[in-house]
Image (spheres, helix red, strand yellow):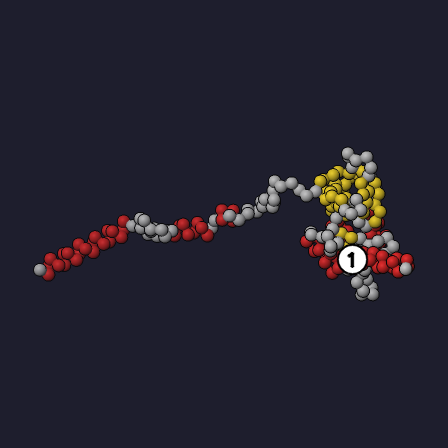
């Protein structure tokens, strides 16, 4: 009887070893949802692109692709620069020159501190006769075209703010880049921000308001 039990135990152990050898090491049993070890390694070593991230050098699709832009792009020639935020250009399809008001910025008035220097800086960016690309956003209350102006590949609106030659026009500005450039100009004390007295320069809209008040008092 004992001999029979011993033979049965040996047979059972042999069967278990044979069954274990039939299942590959590191692989799940048939029907299991648990990934094998090789699958886990492949997931951690996959490239960013395979995980839904952008590959190096690729660009995301622009927001609103396919929608009509809110401006008309015109290729014109600079005929005059009046001050640091306005000029005249000659564009194909127009008999007269167009008055352009640089969009989202405000430069000092000519009879204000830094006014002449602001005009001269814009003239250096967009000299007479220069070919310019104007993004026309429509007319303002004075029938000037609100434009983002590019001369010789330079964004004139941004360059005026970056150099401290103009303010961001707070009441109309929506471009966050312009605010960042203005903060840089203030930190580095460029242009109109380089005041020795420590006083903040007077914004053009406040300067114009004071002028209107003075004119009103004189008429009384």
Q: Position of residue 170 (x, y in %)?
A: 73, 55
Res 137 → quadrant:
top right
- Whether residue 124 can be seen here: no
Q: Which residue is mark 1?
A: 190
Q: Count of labels shown?
A: 1
- Whether residue 148 can be seen here: yes
* Above/below status of 158 relative to 130: below
Observer-nearest residue: 38 or 220?
A: 220
Q: Residues within 10 Å of mark 1 (few under 14, many from 20)?
A: some
Could you tell me which quadrant the N terminus lies in?
bottom left
Could you tell me which quadrant the C terminus lies in?
bottom right
SS under mark 1: loop
Observer-nearest residue: 208 or 176?
A: 208
Res 7 → quadrant:
bottom left
Q: Position of residue 14 (x, y in %)?
A: 20, 54
Which residue ends up furthest to the front in the rendered image? 220
Q: Position of residue 216 (x, y in %)?
A: 87, 58
Q: Residue at x 77, y 46 (%)?
A: 140
């Amino acid at each position: 009887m004992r001999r029979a039990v011993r033979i049965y135990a040996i047979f059972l152990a042999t069967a278990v070893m044979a069954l274990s050898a039939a299942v590959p090491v590191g692989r799940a049993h048939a029907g299991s949802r648990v990934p094998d070890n090789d699958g886990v390694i492949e997931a951690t070593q996959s490239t960013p692109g395979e995980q839904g991230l952008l590959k190096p050098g690729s660009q995301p699709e622009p927001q609103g692709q396919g929608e009509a832009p809110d401006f008309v792009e015109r290729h014109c020639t600079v005929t005059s620069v009046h001050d640091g935020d306005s000029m005249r250009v000659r564009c194909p399809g127009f008999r007269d020159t167009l008055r352009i008001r640089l969009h989202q910025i405000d430069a000092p008035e000519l009879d204000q501190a830094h006014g002449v220097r602001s005009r001269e800086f814009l003239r250096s960016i967009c000299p007479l006769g220069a070919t310019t690309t104007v993004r026309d956003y429509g007319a303002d209350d004075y029938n000037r075209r609100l434009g983002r102006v590019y001369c010789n590949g330079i964004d004139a609106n941004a360059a005026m703010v970056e150099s401290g030659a103009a303010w961001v026009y707070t009441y109309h500005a929506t471009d966050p880049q312009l605010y960042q450039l203005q903060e840089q100009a203030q930190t580095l004390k460029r242009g109109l921000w380089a005041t020795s007295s420590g006083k903040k320069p007077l914004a053009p809209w406040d300067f114009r308001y004071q002028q209107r008040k003075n004119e009103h008092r004189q008429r009384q």
